[in-house]
Image (tube, rainbow, N blue to C red):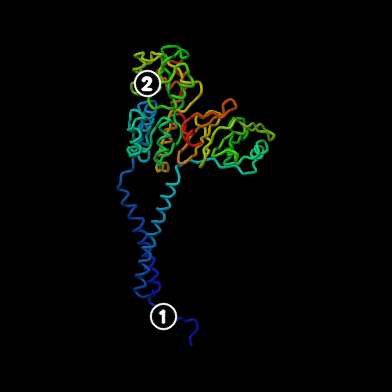
Amino acid sequence: MDAIKRGAIFWAAALVLGLALSFGVPWLTSQGEEEPKLVIGVGDDITGRLTERILARYEADGHGGLIHNGAQDLDSYLFIDCCSNAGQWSLLAQDTDMGFYCTHISTAIVNQNEGFSIYGPVVMNGEVLGYWKEPSEIQTIAIPMKREHLARLVREGYPQAGEPREVSATSILYAFEDKQVDGAVMDIARAFQLPQYNYTRVCDQDYVSYCLVVRDDITGTDQFQTFLRYYNETAEALNDRETIQELYGMSDQFWEDVRLKFLYLPE
Amino acid sequence: MREGNKIPGKHSMPLWLILALAAAGVVGAFFLREHLLALEAEEAKGSNGIIYAEPVPEDHPGLLYYEEQVPGREIILACEDDLTDDGQADLVVIYHNPEEGRKNWMVALINQGDGIYTITEPTPAPIENQTIRFFEMDKEPPLEFVLTGEKDGEIGYAIYRMIDGALINLFGEGMEDCC
């Protein structure tokens, strides 16, 4: 073997060594790292119920985690009310990677912070009007705090009621039950707690109640794509009247009136 | 003199050259890796995974019809899909009227066939970075579309559906700040 051949072999070996050091070592070290967990923030509302079903489906799935068998790589973070500071900070501080938020807060988050997007709407007609008087005769009406989109719908739909009174999302059910107001717009999941009262839809026209807000850097991950599949399967299941009625009760008339719809996200 | 019988030469590579080549190999591989990682990061940064509708060409029959009916408008973005579930492609058009100030509008052109379109009432549209995405959000016709855009950094987001011949915003947040 002449010197040129020896040189070529040496050069090739050096190149392989260089590639191995540059690509192989980082890959080997990454094998020991824990697979990142996808955490979704949800309020104590219909999106919380939706997430419960997604997680139940996820756990019941024989494949285990989103990526690996048995891996717990999807979890939820409950922040009671999406309009609370905790709800927004959990996403901004990266305690969560994505979250279900009402339309007002969704827009506020993507407007005030770079790197976040509204991935898509998730719930349509997600609120109900609980009423003591016929809706056309309501004089005082309560809405959950900071729900600008609901305030607009109420002003248009119930002009005789005057300016809606803002009440915290957690206590609106009690304000309604105490008859402090003639009617109250509340998340549909609150109505499940007091099924004996009268409820109807907030307005005749469909409207979006909640969206999925995501940190942009997660949308390309395998976990997120698999989450979308679980989400869409769950939405499909909950859009079946019998299934949702079996889970949350309420009368046939209730489900006929409210026209709740879980929306589908692009995969 | 012997023909075709090469005598092996003593052209050995100097040690310094071998070491330099080896070093160059390692450094080259390192920079290749850095370059690939940078490309990956750039791709992740510039995309939120959402695919938007492609604009139609300037000579699209719907756009020609619109320019004939409403001359003098600057077309900013026009995308097509079936908004009324009648099997015909309709058009969503965002435009600017040069006679107005900093204001844009959006209309839908509903395809009636034979090159005729019904034009909806104009609704305010974002000033810059407009995007349109058609999608079946409830898996029931008609098709909805998302309109996004900005004005001075304020992002607007709206979801429209054709209802009774009009474009209705089902989302109703943020557009007042970006239009």
**Mark 2 burial class by Cα count in 10 Å: few <14, some 14-19, many 20+:** many
Q: Residue drawn at (58%, 28%), measured in percent from left and top?
A: B166
| Residue lying furthest right | B114
Compute the Cα span from label 1 to label 2: 91 Å
Crowd tier of the residue under label 1, counting other residues whose Cα lies within 10 Å: few below 14, some 14–19, many 20 or above: few
Image-quadrant location for residue A1:
bottom left
Residue located beneath label 2 in the image: A190
Q: Nearer the viewer, mark 1 or mark 2?
A: 2
Judged left or right of residue B178, residue B18 is: left
Residue A253 x %, y %: 46, 15
Residue type, label 1:
Gly
Q: Report the side of A189 relative to B97 (left or right).
A: left
Please provide percent x and percent y for residue A40.
36, 35
Q: Are marks 1 and 2 on the same chain?
A: no
Label 2 chain ID = A
**In this figure, which residue is indicated by the disc labeled 1?**
B9
User: Nearest the camera: A211 or B94?
Assistant: B94
Camera-side residue: A219 or A112?
A: A112
Q: Which residue type does callout 2 highlight?
A: Arg
Q: Secondary structure at mark 1?
A: loop
Asked whether, in this view, residue B55 is left or right of residue B178, the answer is right
Q: Check disc 2 and report its element: helix, strand or loop.
A: helix
Q: Position of residue A108 (x, y in %)?
A: 41, 35
Report in which chain the residue with disc 1 lies: B
